[in-house]
Amino acid sequence: MKILVSGGAGYIGSHTCAELLLSGHEIVVVDNLSNSNESSLERVKEITGKDLIFIKEDITDEMKMEKIFLEHHFDAVIHFAGHKAVGESVSVPLNYYHNNISGSLTLFKLMKKYEIKKLVFSSSATVYGSHNKVPLKEDMPLSASNPYGRTKLFIEEMLRDIYSADPEWSIAILRYFNPVGAHPSGLLGENPKGIPNNLFPYVTQVAAGKRTCLSIFGSDYDTKDGTGIRDYIHVADLAGGHLKALEAVACSNGIEAFNLGTGQGYSVLEIVRMFEKVSGKKIPFQLSERRKGDAAVSYADCSKARILLQWNAEKSLEDMCRDSWNWQMNQTETYLDKELQII
């Protein structure tokens, strides 16, 4: 199939592009590079030995996006493009509503116009809000406590309305939990611009000496060691989930949401200890106050994806930490964070 991958130069997108190429698909990546680097796609080509088409464009630009749809006949779309930092979304909500919702609306309008009705959408576990009990299941009530989560929730509702109006659509909504890790080759990984918002890239930078100390927010939760517990999933497993979802939408109509996680949780201190084990480095940390809105425990029930998509996460916590560390140690000058002035 020929697949349009929006946001395909990003962390999860680039890993999925590699899997798509290895599976024999033809891909066109559209990305504005606001939080990614074109060199990730060069690495995808290096890993796979296959070519792809990259177009630097913003999906909110309807005229330029329509030109892309006119030039290429797509069989399906995998939609990653969107701003993704919870904290930033609170500070600049209008940016998030414009980019995430307006961009998605533009994309869906063009899909409808050009009769492309097969979609895999990158959603998030944030749509479960903070009041559901674990394990989190797809049929639980949905809510959001920040603009980022609300954009994902609104887009999910938009897709349900689209399917209700036209049951020929086939849509898989993938609710990620906490993507981590890197490609086993060490050529692809998470490289956030500026200060990392997520635990794993921050820990790897502390282990590498790029940052002095890790702040652990909350040490008095009702958990085994007092720190928060989350469901971390290796990005390679997550990329495999997209292929399974694509296979599903290619041969049926309907709309379904799927959790993609491991189905178990790890505490922050467990992550720190495992990183110390695989890296051989001491990771300094300090205990800080809880962050408002953070849940003590969050992990998925992934049985629906296991049954309907025939997908299951296979990578261990040690795999996640080892591959993250390998990526950190193998970064080239292209990927170095200029703010840190590392040579």
Image: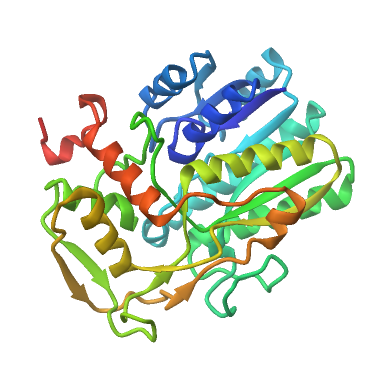
Residue 324 vertical position relative to residue 283 in the rendered view, above or below:
above
Question: How far across and down, in percent of the image, does residue 228 sit?
Answer: 37, 74
The one nearer the camera, 34 or 169, is 169
Q: Is residue 107 visible?
A: yes
Q: Is residue 197 visible?
A: no
**Image quadrant containing the C terminus:** top left
Q: Is residue 141 left or right of residue 92?
A: right
Image coordinates for residue 59, horizontal then vertical, percent: 56, 33
Q: Which of 249 and 49 is in front in this view?
A: 49
Residue at (27%, 80%) from the top-left corner? 219
Depicted 113 relative to depicted 216: above or below: above
Residue under the image location 29 percent in, 59 percent down: 274
User: Which residue is at 58% across, 80% downward?
Assistant: 133
| Quarter of the rendering occupied by the N terminus | top right
- Residue at image point 42% right, 78% down: 296
Q: Is residue 244 left or right of residue 343?
A: right
